[in-house]
Image (cartoon, grey):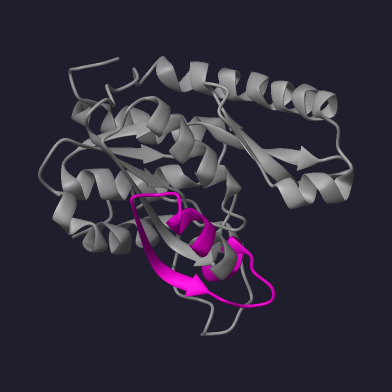
Amino acid sequence: MPALFPNEREGKIMTTNDRQLIFKDRTDAGKRLATALSGYKHGENIVFAIPRGGVPVAAEVAAALKTTLDIIVVRKIPIPHNTEAGYGAVTEDGSLVLNEPMVKYLGLTMPEITRQSEAVRNEIIRRNRLCREILPPSRVEGRTAIVIDDGLASGYTMLAAIQSLRNRKASEVVVAVPVASGTAYDLVGSAADKLICLKVARTDYFAVASYYLNWYDLDDEEVLQYLKLLNPHHADVKE
């Protein structure tokens, strides 16, 4: 089956070894993940992408399963003075998951956490508003939610997504990712009803980007393009 979105742009070429390099790009990862999820082709299922990187992966899965594509906007709460790392994650509905050992190590107070999580949530609301102009939210209650990202590093972003979908009364939460660190795999596996992961990397150093040949950061416009192209598949019943 040809890629649904074959025009994923050329990005940074990662230098890595054959053991690590298993996906050409997010489209390739999505096609492989769709095969692993073929058992969900029938039934009341919704595919949720975590923007931005999870959208191209989830788009291929939703198209292959002929089911609804939706989004769940989650963002990490960055560590002060080191925005590349995080100590937790928050969703649009305020679902908050903290890496408690990290919080303790950093000596963060609850007022500091609240202030930072609210700042992150404001960005989530902005992103969500953009997407909802194209894609109204799906009804989740009583349905299986399949949550997809391009990989799991710490796992805390996915934990927040799981919590948010349980708050919306999903009957089952299935997490599907191309690659995960061993730590994240164990953490998310204990929280999801089912975890499907094509590659678990139990290594001292882990970066999702290392498992893709063509890796780059998507922008809002590219995310909206995917949602526009798949909008006809969206369910008629909304929340």
Asked whether 155 or 122 is in front, the reply is 155
Q: In which quarter of the image is the C terminus?
A: top left
Tell me the quarter of the picture where residue 98 sits: top right
From the top left corner, tell me how far across and down residue 37 is, in percent: 23, 57
Q: Which residue is drawn at 55% across and 34% down?
A: 74
From the top left corner, tell me how far across and down residue 209 is, in percent: 59, 62
- Specify whether 116 is left or right of 158: right
Q: Is residue 221 above or below residue 177?
A: above
Q: Which residue is drawn at 22% across and 29% down?
A: 142
Q: Does the magenta stretch include residue 123?
A: no
- Residue 73, can we see it? yes
Q: Does the magenta stretch include residue 197?
A: yes
- Specify whether 147 is left or right of 78: left
Asked whether 230 or 100 is in front, the reply is 100
Q: Residue at x 17, y 57 (%)?
A: 38
The total number of labels drawn is: 0
- Specify whether 81 is left or right of 219: right
Q: Which residue lies furthest to the bottom in this view?
A: 18
From the top left corner, tell me how far across and down residue 123 is, in percent: 65, 23
Q: Which residue is drawn at 51% across and 45% down?
A: 158
Q: Is residue 178 above or below residue 76?
A: below
Q: Is residue 113 above or below residue 97?
A: above
- Residue 51, can we see it? no
From the top left corner, tell me how far across and down residue 31 is, in percent: 29, 59
Asked whether 16 or 138 is in front, the reply is 138
Query: Over which residues does the magenta segment extend?
Result: 186-212
Tell me the quarter of the picture where residue 195 sits: bottom left
Q: Quadrant of the N terminus?
A: bottom left
